[in-house]
Image (cartoon, rainbow, N blue to C red):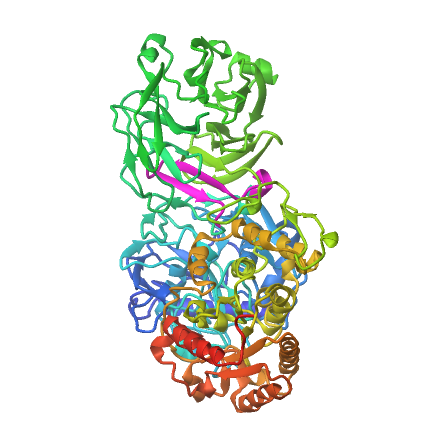
């Protein structure tokens, strides 16, 4: 009853403010435009305010000195449509109410509890907010703005992934506001002085609207808790964009945007242009100071803008993850290329890249029928499509974001390229001189089929191989050829014939193996109906004939769709076909993978017009295959043998589980930082026989130590991860590093006095329980972390497993240091938690201290030097009552440091390296990445000093 009274009061307040609006001063730039009660036909929305469309400019980002890289440059946005936005943040009471009432329908977890109903809901993932929005839409009889095929939850009931998530800008229902919508509502009266922040909040959230409303009727946009918005974290450009809805994807880490200030933020750090937290924010991130509010309204003429800076009026949505692809193909080495018919460009997806982005190669060439090369590195395409007569050009280019290496075949006309590797090992492209209709045999025979070698980025000399346009495929030995552009024509041993009883057929494709099977589409012909056993419509079945023309298999399109552009998979996997699905209006809305062995379809992508897909699949388990300079495993089962130090009689042959070994990452979203851990596991196995210094710890170590700055004989590797804590570091050292690093002489670990032991265990300590979501860690633990085994093959497996191309290129050249992280400045100090929450007497400190003591003992027993580093923090913390970002009373820090230093008395191999000096350090502003971390210049200085420290220790580096 108390909650209902509260919302009635809120409605009255909103009504009063609305009434006042009509006589308010003129609209300010970037402001709300107008405020109003909600439309009558939108039920149960009494706490939402209208934000009117206008030509006013909304400013995203900032050019201010000290602003972060992802906040620059300032970009102007115009929102010309109306939308509604919650006057206040979604309350815990409202959230739990809908979970209980609509939880079963939306697969909500049921174990959330509120301390107070009127507090903002916090500790929710982006996916949790999406599910709540959908539930409210259903309850109010509106469309669900978000669609997805499956939801995944962690053990505490939070949604960690929504498979195939699509944001429908044209649907009217509850949703998260875009970043631009949030800023437009906030900018006109953004008053930090009236917010809940770390100067008045006692480091806890407060009842919504318990501070002053702004003049438009909104509450808490400047403080209380930060808020999810709908956008992926993209880049800004110095331009003006209309109806901007964000980036099409979240880049290599899948980053999202959160806005506003929070109860733990310093007022000087609260503004409208900040876009995130100190740490990476992904869709599965959750914390006690991030909540959300909802919006309603369709977004006409929505514009996305990706890393290329090119505005897009539509995007391609991915419907399957790399993990889904692996379940179908048993390989992560899969690439999909297709024509985006809206732009005429070739677009592609690399499923070996965990970033899961659709990359479009920007060009002025109208590209049809792209086909991926046998090695997966290039794509061939032409400028005319099947069934259309006329001259066509044929091109080949690299299958990368820039489409480099573009070459054109110098002939009069070449259409429908098909790659193949001949029996002699030569790579060739088969093409036809014209891909027009083949119904008239006389005209069709005037066309011809050719092959041209392609090697090292250049074409060889074209050679005519037969008369007639056989663009469906030619066998390696040239004895079998197919085509179909109205009629299914076949050539076998130089003899031409018609198949399928001369009935209409198209989209003919010959299998990539030696079976000479032919897949094609028909028009519901009598022959097909007789084989299938019932009548069907145009292109409703993919039909497959054997090498004699006998129909042997068919696959039916999903209800409401028909097939088009069906093609056999390229590569070494035989039983897969890729195709588009057309809706009743004829629009090519989806691309699907057809698994012929199982007879099932996997949705791959969805867009407005997706044409001519080509899928390349490298057969076998990529985790056990060679890549780059790594020595691959030659058989499907790898053998691990015991260390040579053991007697030959004790050697154990052990076969890898190909679905588990080295699989330290997937798309489950169970841990926001799993991708970082995955690469540190790769470096763990890579450097186990060479590194003698290992760096571990939190993000301060991750950003603060450059292995390449250490001089010989030191060989260092940075195995630290963002958000790492002492418990996770000790587990990692005890089970992985110390048992396997035979040349280990020193460990460098961050000493984070202000870090507690239980900060969001899913993200802050993967090894606590979240590791169970990643088969590689489970596999390791099951086998006692391979202690005593020869682990050389684990590096190969991990290197080739699912990851991120961008993160790999950042970390691999520098042995784990995030090169190019740059600098911003120390900025203003940010105290996230109450400084009284950690003290010398708190269980948190005692727990961390005892783990450090145990680690010092282990290092002493193994003759390993343990260097504990107090990394430099913002010197302005001297002006606060806190030691650092996460808290700890500053007055208690010296005593704690002294206690840690005394460990050296019992364990002489333990060394304290204090570079913070209670803020009295010499790490200047240009050496900082942010208030909590060093940038490149600071990391270089830190690393050189650590190198000098270790070089001067009495360590026998040659042992």
Q: Position of residue 136 (x, y in %)?
A: 56, 55
Query: What's the residue at 63%, 59% (across, down)?
Result: 771
Instruction: Point out the stretch of residues depicted in magenta.
Output: 326-353
**In the rendered view, would you say 92 is above or below 602?**
below
Q: Is residue 310 above or below residue 431?
A: below
- Is any part of residue 612 visible from this angle? yes
In this image, 650 relative to 159: left or right? right
The spot of residue 261 in percent (x, y) is 45, 72
**Residue shown at the point (34%, 76%) measured from the top left:** 926
Horizontal and vertical percent position of residue 479: 46, 15
Q: Is residue 4 visible?
A: no
Q: Is residue 12 above or below residue 915?
A: above
Q: Residue at x 38, y 12 (%)?
A: 439
- The quadrant of the picture occupied by the C terminus is bottom right
Q: Is residue 859 above or below residue 186?
A: below
Question: Does the magenta run of residues contain 331?
Answer: yes
In the rendered image, residue 760, in percent from the top left (x then y), is placed at 59, 68
Q: Which quadrant would residue 495 be assigned to in this image? A: top left
Count every numbered label the image shows and give the total. 0
Front position in the image: 241 or 20:
241
């Amino acid at each position: 009853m108390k909650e209902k009274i509260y919302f009635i009061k809120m409605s009255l307040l909103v009504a009063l403010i609305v009434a006042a609006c009509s006589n308010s001063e003129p609209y300010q730039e970037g402001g709300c435009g107008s405020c109003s009660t909600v439309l009558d036909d939108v039920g149960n929305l009494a706490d939402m305010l209208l934000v009117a469309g206008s030509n006013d400019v909304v400013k995203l980002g900032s050019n201010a000195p000290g602003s972060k890289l992802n906040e620059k440059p300032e970009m102007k946005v115009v929102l010309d449509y109306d939308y509604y936005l919650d006057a206040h943040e979604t309350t815990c009471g409202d959230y739990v109410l809908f979970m209980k009432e609509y939880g079963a329908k939306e697969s909500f977890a049921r174990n959330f509890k509120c301390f107070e109903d009127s507090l903002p809901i916090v500790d929710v993932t982006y996916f949790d907010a999406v599910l709540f929005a959908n539930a409210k839409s259903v309850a109010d009889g509106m469309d669900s703005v978000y669609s997805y095929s499956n939801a995944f939850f962690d053990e505490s009931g939070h949604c960690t992934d929504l498979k195939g998530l699509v944001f429908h800008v044209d649907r009217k229902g509850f949703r998260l506001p875009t970043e631009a919508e949030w800023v437009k509502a906030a900018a006109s009266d953004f008053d930090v002085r009236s917010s809940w922040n770390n100067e008045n909040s006692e480091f806890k959230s407060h009842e919504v609207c318990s501070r002053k409303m702004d003049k438009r009727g909104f509450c808490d946009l400047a403080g209380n808790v930060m808020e999810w918005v709908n956008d992926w974290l993209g880049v800004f450009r110095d331009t003006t964009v209309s109806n901007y809805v964000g980036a099409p994807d979240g880049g290599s880490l899948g980053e999202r945007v959160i806005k506003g200030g929070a109860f733990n933020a310093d007022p000087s750090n609260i503004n409208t242009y900040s876009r995130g937290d100190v740490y990476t924010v992904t869709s599965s991130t959750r914390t006690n100071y991030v909540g959300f509010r909802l919006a309603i309204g369709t977004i006409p003429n929505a514009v996305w803008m990706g890393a290329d800076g090119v505005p897009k009026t539509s995007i391609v949505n991915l419907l399957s993850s790399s993990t889904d692809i692996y379940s179908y193909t048993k390989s992560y080495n899969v690439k999909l290329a297709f024509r985006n018919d809206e732009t005429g460009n070739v677009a592609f997806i690399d499923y070996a890249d965990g970033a899961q982005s659709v990359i479009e190669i920007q060009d002025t060439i109208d590209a049809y029928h792209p086909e991926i090369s046998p090695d997966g590195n290039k794509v061939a395409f032409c400028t005319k499509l099947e069934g259309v007569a006329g001259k066509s050009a044929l091109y080949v280019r690299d299958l990368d974001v820039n489409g480099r290496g573009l070459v054109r075949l110098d002939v009069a006309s070449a259409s429908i390229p098909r790659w193949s590797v001949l029996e002699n090992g030569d790579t060739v492209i088969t093409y036809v001189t014209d891909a027009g209709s083949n119904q008239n045999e006389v005209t069709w025979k005037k066309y011809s089929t050719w092959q041209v070698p392609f090697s090292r980025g250049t074409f060889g000399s074209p050679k005519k191989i037969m008369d007639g346009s056989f663009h469906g495929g030619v066998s390696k030995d040239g004895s079998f050829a197919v085509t179909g552009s109205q009629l299914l024509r076949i050539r076998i041993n130089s003899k031409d014939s018609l198949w399928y009883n001369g009935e209409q057929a198209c989209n003919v494709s010959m299998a990539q193996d030696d079976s000479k099977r032919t897949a094609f589409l028909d028009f519901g012909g009598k022959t097909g109906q007789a084989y299938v056993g019932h009548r069907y419509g145009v292109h409703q079945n993919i039909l497959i004939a054997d090498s004699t023309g006998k129909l042997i298999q068919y696959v039916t399109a999903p209800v409401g769709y028909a097939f088009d552009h069906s093609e056999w998979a390229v590569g070494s996997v035989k039983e897969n076909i890729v195709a588009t699905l057309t809706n009743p209006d004829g629009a090519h809305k989806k691309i699907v993978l057809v698994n012929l062995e199982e007879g099932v379809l996997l949705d791959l992508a969805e867009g407005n017009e997706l044409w001519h897909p080509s899928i390349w699949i490298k057969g076998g388990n990529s985790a056990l295959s060679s890549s780059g300079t790594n020595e691959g495993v030659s058989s499907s089962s790898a053998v691990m043998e015991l260390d040579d130090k053991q007697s030959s009689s004790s050697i154990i042959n052990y076969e890898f589980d190909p679905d588990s070994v080295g699989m330290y990452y997937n798309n489950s979203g169970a841990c926001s930082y799993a991708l970082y851990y995955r690469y540190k596991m790769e470096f763990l196995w890579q450097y186990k026989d060479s590194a003698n210094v290992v760096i571990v710890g939190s993000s301060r170590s991750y950003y603060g130590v450059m292995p390449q700055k250490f001089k010989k004989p030191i060989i260092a590797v940075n195995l630290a991860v963002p958000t790492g804590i002492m418990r996770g570091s000790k587990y990692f050292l005890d089970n992985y590093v110390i048992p396997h690093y035979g040349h280990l002489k020193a460990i460098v670990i961050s000493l984070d006095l202000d870090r507690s032991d239980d900060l969001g265990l899913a993200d802050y300590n993967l090894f606590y329980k979240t590791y169970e979501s990643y088969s590689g860690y489970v596999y390791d633990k099951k086998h006692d972390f391979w202690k005593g085994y020869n682990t050389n093959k684990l590096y190969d497996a991990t290197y080739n497993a699912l990851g991120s191309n961008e993160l790999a290129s950042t970390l691999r050249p520098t042995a784990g240091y995030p090169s190019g992280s740059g600098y911003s400045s120390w900025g203003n100090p940010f105290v996230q938690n109450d400084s009284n929450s950690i003290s010398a007497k708190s269980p948190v400190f005692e727990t961390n201290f005892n783990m450090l003591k145990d680690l010092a003992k282990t290092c002493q027993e193994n003759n390993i030097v343990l260097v504990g580093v107090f990394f430099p923090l913002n010197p302005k913390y001297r002006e606060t009552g806190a030691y650092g970002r996460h808290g700890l009373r500053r007055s208690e820090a010296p005593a704690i440091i002294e206690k840690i230093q005394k460990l050296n008395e019992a364990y002489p191999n333990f060394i304290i390296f204090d570079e913070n000096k209670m803020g009295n350090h010499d790490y200047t502003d240009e050496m900082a990445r942010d208030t909590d971390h060093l940038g490149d210049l600071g990391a270089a200085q830190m690393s050189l000093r650590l190198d000098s420290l270790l070089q001067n220790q009495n360590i026998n580096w040659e042992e």
